[in-house]
Image (cartoon, grey):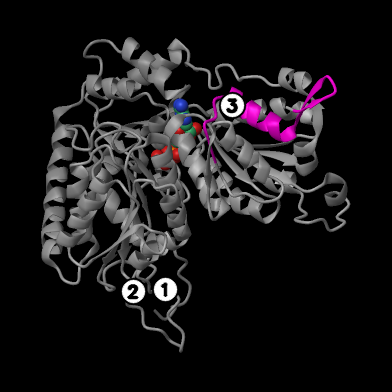
Amino acid sequence: GDVVGAKKLTDGIHLVVDALKLNEVDAIYGVVGIPITDLARLAQASGIRFIGFRHESAAGHAAAAAGFLTKKPGICLTVSAPGFLNGLVALANATVNCFPMVQISGSSERHLVDLQRGDYEEMDQLAAARQFAKAAYRVHRAEDIGRGVARAIRTAVSGRPGGVYLDIPAAVLGEVIDADLGAASLWRVVDPAPRQVPEPAALDRAIELLASAQRPLVVLGKGAAYAQADDQIRQFVELTGVPYLPMSMAKGLLPDDHAQSVASARSLALRRADVVMLVGARLNWLLGHGDAPQWNSDAKFIQVDIASTELDSNQPIAAPLVGDVGSVMQALIERTGPGQIAVPAQWRDELSARSAENVGKMARRLKAAETAHPMKFLGGLQAIRDVLRENPQAYVVNEGANALDLARNTIGMQVPRHRLDSGTWGVMGIGMGYAIAAAVETGEPVVAIEGDSAFGFSGMEIETICRYNLPVVTVVLNNSGVYRGDAVSTSGDPAPTALRARHDLMIAAFGGRGYRATTPVEVAAALREALTLRQPALIDCVIDPADGTESGNIAHLNPKGITVQR
Ligand code: ADP
């Protein structure tokens, strides 16, 4: 701080940076502007990495992905009103996905905002954020900045992780206070996400239920991936021999080619299982709410979750296990007697017969796609799959409709937490933000597999990728439309679902490498080269406009009503 007379001074901006550093924040994702530009400068000068984006939603999505990957809240920095609102989309999405993040936003002067006098970027941001975040706090005095940061971090990571909003008005950022008092006002959060173990009786109830099952099933969700309890999960699954189903972001927790994976007999597993153990997975729409006929109406559920209020949200939970995945799985391993849980051979045989059948069907589709021209989604995707097999450490980001459904099923994951996708909302727009965070947080290469529509929501961030020279290869599966590119327009304008772009030319404008691929062989060659170079690249894959289904796997969610002309 500055010295005036004998007194050392500091200010709100310095205190924010000092508080973040004290809590081991090493990266901030944001967009600068009034009143936070100096905060970004100071953070960078103090050794925190500042990644400057082109749009706050992408910055926020990056912070959320950083939270998922590291178990520490990702930090997003936004300006007032519109910047704040852009970031809020990501904060809400992070909260829905149970990813820890903190959005710190500058805001306009309280005395003007609260009387609605019409200030520059006037908005009651705290009130707006509250309903979309796990919590929202505002700091009114520089001496409370340390408290505000500590509270935001604690709230974001403890219990069910989520997004926290921290409002810091411009006046507080500029407030000057005594440096010693300032330093004394900061603290470091101790044990931000304490372990939590259920009581022995709850564990035994779950073990006995699983042991009584004829057709047991474990479902692993992204909460299990988040927990970083990979060894305990693997040990429990292998010790008991229970078949398991990974939700999309839990893929790789055990390698996708694991003998107990029933991913390729998913619908049979859900319909027939009599005891289901949910581990960090919610019975939400992605699992049909646990309802018949998708599920066996007599199925009994065991649920491992940190959030007690999640239990009984959709189906009765016969054996609740409230705690963190790591501690619960460890306790289950310790309390399960040798041979106590055994899986009837009949169930295993039923599942593997169906798996073999489905794998066979898929193999025929993949074979046909290999040589199809124009290229099909599955043609491009199996080329990507083959190159990714050679690069198991690469992170995969995936969004779109068909691009999401087909990539999820085609591309196996070998390592935990290497797949980031549309998540709980099934949202579009996370692509480049997630990709940037994966590259920044891990230093590993990232392959973002994007539908052409999905890519558009964050496409300008390829400039960010190029500016920071990140090893991100974006693969756009370009069928020239939302869902499909062959819709016939009923007016002089393009059809509502139509798109048209040469994305490979776009990245060239920012100094990245653009490729255009029209065959699977070209896709593989381009991806291999791009991964070897470890430089920003984009591969525009020309996909048959007639390939793709409306809304992908979730077409049933479209309202029916009277017929709309397609
Ligand atoms: P998926 O979409 O993969 O099925 P969800 O996001 O629906 O997964 O579920 C994740 C669940 O994991 C949430 O209910 C959340 O409360 C829970 N969760 C998150 N972190 C932990 C943890 N460390 N231990 C236990 N449960 C967790």
- Depth check, front residue: 227 or 145: 145
The image shows residue 524 at horizontal and vertical percentages of 18, 55
Label 3 residue SS: helix
**Left or right, residue 83 beside residue 564:** right
Mark 2 residue crowding within 10 angstroms, few (<14) / some (14–19) / many (20+): many
294 w.r.t. 380: above or below: above
- Depth check, front residue: 39 or 503: 39
Amino acid bearing label 1: Thr
Amino acid bearing label 2: Gly
- Mark 1 → mark 2, Cα distance in angstroms: 7 Å
Q: Which circle, 3 or 1, is nearer the viewer?
A: 3
Mark 1 residue crowding within 10 angstroms, few (<14) / some (14–19) / many (20+): some
Tell me the magenta residue range.
Answer: 2-28
Q: Residue 497: which numbered mark, if any? A: 1
The image shows residue 421 at horizontal and vertical percentages of 39, 47
The image shows residue 171 at horizontal and vertical percentages of 80, 41
